[in-house]
Amino acid sequence: MSNAKDPFCCCSCSQETLYDVLKYLLITYNFFFLLLGFSLIGLGVYSEIMRSELTEADHVFVTPSVFLFILGAVVSIFACIGFVASLRDNFCLLRTFNICIVVCILIEVGAGIAALIFKDPAKEFVNRYILKGLVTYYDDQDLKNLVDFIQEEFQCCGGRLYKDWEKNPYHNCTAPGPAACGVPYSCCKPDNSTVINSMCGYNTLQLTTEEAVEVIYLIGCIDAVLDFLWVNLDLLAGLLLGIFLPQMAGIFLGVFYLQVLEKIVSNFPAAPENESFMHEEARQYGFQQQEPYTVQSL
């Protein structure tokens, strides 16, 4: 192999050294995300099994377990492609790995830009899935814990409005139970009492806005989360960096490694045209080519 210096490298290292460093970095990178993907899949499957043992609700596509499973499957597929490509120096798989990450970044950026431009339709799109989750709120413990955490942490109630809880069969005003025309206790504003009043949200949907604001949060969770991110721009920037930096690192390693690999292959010495491949291999292993045998005439 050639020992020429790589023009892309800021340090004076040979192409072979750069090749080894990038190869091990890319293998380690993809192996880490392969383990992460399998962990997410296992966590999603375990959560879905536990959920199915507690309830027979059909709205599985809005459950956190399904989200974890899909996310883990996507991460595992991309990481597996990159791992095999870097392990076997497969040009086709390396290009596929790079293209997959670029497509993912373009989709994420495109979705973000579309959400900013079409803000209200994006909110309605998200709210449709939130309403599906509110319907099965009491049927899925994982979903219930997630909704309660968001409502308590961001001091909100429902998707876009607190009246979204009318979609829940237990909180609908036509329901026969005591929770009719009410909201969950996680929508309630905290008081100074030491005992948690789990019935604080009962009958609040029948109150006027002026009366309900004294008891529960009226703002929807979509607007509450967006307001929180807008106020805490440093947290939003850290979140975006945490999403994009690993993907950008994968693109850098994949493209750089592919360039170095192509350069090494292009510099690989070819056998002379007048010699066969077997003769070239034999000379590398120290065998001498024999002269052709001639028969002496009598």
Image: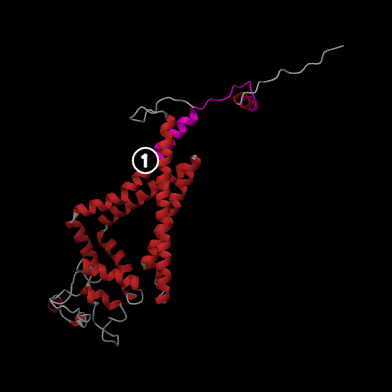
Residue positioned most to the right = 298
Considering only vertical position in the picture, is 235 above or below 132?
above
Residue at point 39% right, 66% down? 65
Give the camera-side residue of 92 and 4: 4
Considering only vertical position in the picture, is 274 above or below 145?
above
Considering only vertical position in the picture, is 231 above or below 87?
below
When asked about the image quadrant of residue 67, the answer is: bottom left
Q: Secondary structure at mark 1?
A: helix
**Residue 111 located left or right of residue 195:** right
Task: Indicate the position of residue 66 as horizontal and vertical percent values.
Answer: 40, 65
When asked about the image quadrant of residue 152, the answer is: bottom left
Query: Which amino acid type is shown beneath numbered disc 1?
Result: Phe
In the picture of the structure, the residue carrying the numbered disc 1 is 252
Residue at point 23% right, 69% down? 151
274 falls in the magenta region? yes
The stretch in magenta equals: 252-280
Task: Indicate the position of residue 51 as horizontal and vertical percent values.
Answer: 40, 72
54 falls in the magenta region? no
- Residue 265 at least partly seen: yes
Residue at point 34% right, 73% down? 141
Q: Determine crowd level at label 1: few under 14, some 14-19, many 20+ residues with C-alpha closer than 10 A.
A: some
Quadrant location of the C terminus? top right
- Residue 159 at least partly seen: no
Give the camera-side residue of 154 and 130: 154
Give the camera-side residue of 145 and 258: 145
Residue at point 22% right, 66% down? 153
Task: Indicate the position of residue 75 as horizontal and vertical percent values.
Answer: 41, 54
